[in-house]
Amino acid sequence: MVIMPPTTPYAGKFSSCAPYSNNNNHPQPHSPYRNSTGPKPAKENVYNGAYSAAENPYDIPQPHTSYRSSSVSSVTAKEHHYGSSCAVSENPYSSPQPRSPRQHSTSCPGRAYRHTTTTTTTTSSSSGGSSSEQSCRNNATAAKARLYGHGITASYGEMCYHDNSLVSASLEALIQHLVPTVDYYPDRSYVFTFLLSSRLFLHPYELMTRVCHLCVEQQRSGDALLDKIRFREVAPKLVQLLTEWTETFPYDFRDERMMRCLKDMTHHVARGDEYSWRAMQQMTQRLIKRLSALGQYEEAVAALNAVAMERPASLKSKQASGQRSDVLSVCDDPFILAQQLTHIELDRLSFIGPEEFIQTFAMKDPLENHKGFFRKRKTSNLEAYVNWFNRLSYLVATEICMPVKKKHRARIIEFFIDVAQECFNIGNFNSLMAIITGMNMSPVSRLKKTWSKVNTDKFEILEHQMDPSSNFSNYRTALRGATQRSETAHSSQEKIVIPFFSLLIKDIYFLNEGCASRLANGHINFEKLWELAKQVSEFLVWRQVICPFDRDRRILQYLVTTPVFSEDELHLASYESEGPENNMEKDSRRSLRSSLLHRENRS
């Protein structure tokens, strides 16, 4: 009997996050928009309504998932991490960088290797072996030498290890390694990693079909009674695997073929074990509830987007724009607005499936046009979240360019600077970056007379924190600090970490593009899959947090439905706020007026 090394260097990294420390040594900045009110109590239940285009779209009961907690801690005070006098070099989240996963020990409790008819067990010290195994050994050693230095390399059939960590294997071996038996169940981290990234190589439906088939076939002995007894013993572990699949990657089951396969396995389990059959039924009910909530959410977002597509009331006259409500008439407290932005961010994050990050790179499904009840676009929620970032940026720019009076425009700029600072304090980096992006749009940045009335000290600090130079090194330091605060949190507010989402997608994209998925010998590069899983698992920890702040339906409704200017409309509004400064801008204004007027007449 040969002892099998563990499959993962990240054992235990995919469980729910542990309780986080806060740095609140900086004074609270004064805001001219804040009333001297007391702290806001937390809401016991943040989902208390129904989806409607006319109401708050997020107030619906949330089904239980493994990534959302069921309780909300109260918020006792507004947390502030730096004041207006804070120097540019100061960073409220600066703290020692956590150890890299590459620094963690890769040794985990060993488990017995299950013998199968499809693999042959060997070790690195063996004198013989096939050329494929030798090639696997050489590739693994070369790859690991670059990352870890030299270490112990071993092969077990078609699975290659280095320092007790799985580094490469054939697709067939990885599928076999996922199949539970009576005395074996794969590591949870391996299950997550392979279910996440296997879609780079085969469709989830194909994987599920093969796993279920192998699990059943391995129990066949030719004796019907013995087969039934053996399947009854393995059924609980098969149910456990399918439960992890449906709870972690429920959107895979929007494919009716997946649901049909799940139904077939339920019937098969029912013939052998009543307990496992009941567990399968409960699992299916939870899955359908989750998919139903997702459908309601997507319908609500579509309805809200339709309302938001209406054009703002007045391109013809700046005077008429005074009839339109602005953000200060809806909310004049930066902290409250930052709280409502955090609600939207966390709500939309919670509906992004982890597989959507990988699905953007996956092979095109040959049945992409297959019409089914559960069939939807595979990355729709991720795309909707990116669109929300763009909408918030354009909303900020619209609010600044809309007012007729320079004093009012300056006041709105100062207000959004305070909102951005509050977002930073909360840990809402996505809204923070969206606000900064909106304020740096050329229609806003060209308003020199308006900006001359604004104290930009705090804005410069925030820009420094989100500076893209050195691959966003300042932001990454702040993100690490916010993550460490979250890990030792004593309140729900301290747990909030909302990353700059576009950069997260970019990181995952370049990780996928920069590393080969297959090695020269045809094996799958499992080191790459570990790294993809590590990135996505951090996101799953962040998305589990339930926002502790009170909801304000009026503010939420304004943020998600108020029409915003297009880029051309923003430029024209900017020229009407502060006239063209040169002939080029004059020509641009003339052209914009003509094209927009023509567009309005056509509509």
Image: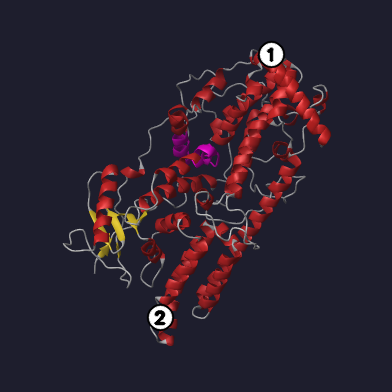
The quarter holding residue 599 reads: top right
Residue in the picture at 75% in, 46% down: 53
Residue in the picture at 71% in, 18% down: 587
Can residue 393 be seen from the camera position used here? Answer: yes
Tell me the amino acid under the disc marked 1. Answer: Asn
**In terms of secondary structure, what is the magenta stretch mainly?**
helix
Mark 1 — residue? 583
Q: Reading the chain from its start, which is encountered first: label 1 or label 2?
A: 2
Picture coordinates of residue 576 (x, y %)? Answer: 75, 19
Residue 229 or 519: which is nearer the viewer?
Answer: 519
Disc 1 versus disc 2: distance between alpha carbons? 83 Å
* Comparing labels 1 and 2, the label whose residue is closer to the camera: 1
Residue 150 or 366: which is nearer the viewer?
Answer: 366
SS for dot 1 = helix
Picture coordinates of residue 9 (x, y %)? Answer: 34, 51
The quarter holding residue 393 reads: top right
Mark 2 — residue? 220
Question: Which residues are the magenta region?
Answer: 479-505
Q: Is residue 100 left or right of residue 486?
A: left
Q: Quadrant of the C terminus?
A: top right
Q: Is residue 150 left or right of residue 598?
A: left
Can residue 325 be seen from the camera position used here? Answer: no
Residue in the picture at 62% in, 25% down: 439
Tell me the amino acid under the disc marked 2. Answer: Arg
Is residue 68 a member of the stretch shown in magenta? no
The quarter holding residue 390 reads: top right
